[in-house]
Amino acid sequence: MSTATPAVTPRRVAVIGCGDISSLHFAAIAALPGAVLVAVCDVHPDRLQTAVTEYGVPGFGDHLELFDTVRPDVIHICTPHHLHASIAIDALERGIHVVMEKPLAHTRAEGDRIVAAAERGQAKIAVCFQNRYNAPVQAAAALLASGELGAIAGASAAVMWFRGAEYYLDRPWRGRWATGGGGLLMNQAIHTLDLLQWLVGEVSEVRGNASTRALGDTIEVEDTAEMVLEHTNGARSVFYATLANAVNAPVTIDIVTEKATLSLRGNLTISYQDGRVEVVEERAVAEGARSYWGVSHQLLIEDFYARLDEPEAFWISPVEAQRSLNIIQDVYDQTYPERAQSSAASENTEENDRKAATL
């Protein structure tokens, strides 16, 4: 039997956006066999220079100049939300693979544009819903898919976190509709919504409300939200999230089935109706400044690179990422109908301009 190590396809990689979350991407790239960081990009000169100095690669203030100059095979998008669509589409149209932070985009229409661009070309794109790679979540998904627990009756989830004014003053884009696309739901709770719809089933109806309870003097977006989700399989989920809590409490997801209740609180506890209890623990994480983010970012990125030569789209694709974005946009449309009307008119104008430009 041969013990030769399979050849690794070299990949030229660039990171666009060098803020907080980019540190996870730089670390994952450094750990990947065959991945070579060739450039960084950021519109903020100080942040760009810090990355250039730390990683020893050329820096660019414009992503198109980066594409044309260094011609990367893969880019990682770690920018504010409103820049996701333009950068991702420009990359996909050039055949450049994309790893992108959530959300898919800052509006439903921009998300649709990314979906269409991905379907037109051959390049792959992954959206970072890395919590799907958490060991307890993977165990819960496998158990639910097996049918062993019977039908899902319903679920509940809660995100009880704290964010102060400083969080938004440090990065003002987070608290603005035009740049963040929303607040709590788009930037924090979207991960839990993604897990809820992925584990319980596709969502067919959304009834919800968003509000600003604690940070109204700092942000224009929501810091609190609640909703009821109806799933196509007949299950119903309830969801609550806030940034007005005193601490960052553990995220909770409880799923009730015919034969057991699954409780995700970091670890997974499976409580069977016959009295048995099983626990699936999360992977151990080394201590450090970013340890609270866990290892699942790296697992997702490793998986993406490992599948680049496969013909199928990556499993957390724009189509998949659009599901949680649509849930959030439905809540916004119900809470802020005047914004929904204004956005629809603006999007129609932009679409007409794009069509006119191609005539």
Image (spheres, rainbow, N blue to C red):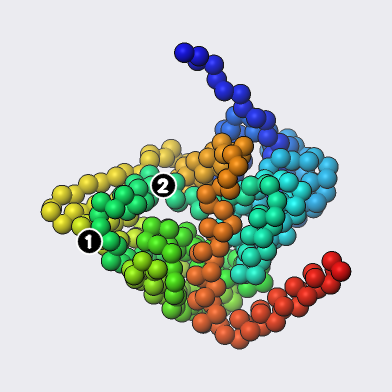
Q: Is residue 102 above or below residue 174?
A: above
Residue in the picture at 68% in, 47% down: 122
For label 2, the residue is 134
Looking at the rendered image, the disc whose residue lies closer to the viewer, 2 or 1, is 1
Residue, far left: 274
Measured as percent of width and height from the top left, residue 257 is found at: 25, 61
Q: Amino acid at mark 2?
A: Asn
Q: Could you tell which of marks 2 and 1 lies nearer the N-terminus?
A: 2
Q: Is residue 257 visible?
A: yes
Q: Is 88 left or right of 254, judged from the image as shown? A: right
Front in this rendered view, residue 209 or 214: 209
Please give the label number shown on residue 258: 1
* Residue 170 quadrant: bottom right
**Within-10-Å neighbours for mark 2: few <14, some 14–19, many 20+:** many
Q: Is 338 left or right of 200, judged from the image as shown? A: right
Callout 2: SS: loop
Residue in the picture at 59% in, 57% down: 318
Callout 1: SS: loop
Q: Amino acid at mark 1?
A: Glu
**Within-10-Å neighbours for mark 1: few <14, some 14–19, many 20+:** some
Residue, far top: 1
Spatial CA span between label 2 and label 1? 24 Å
* Residue 353 quadrant: bottom right
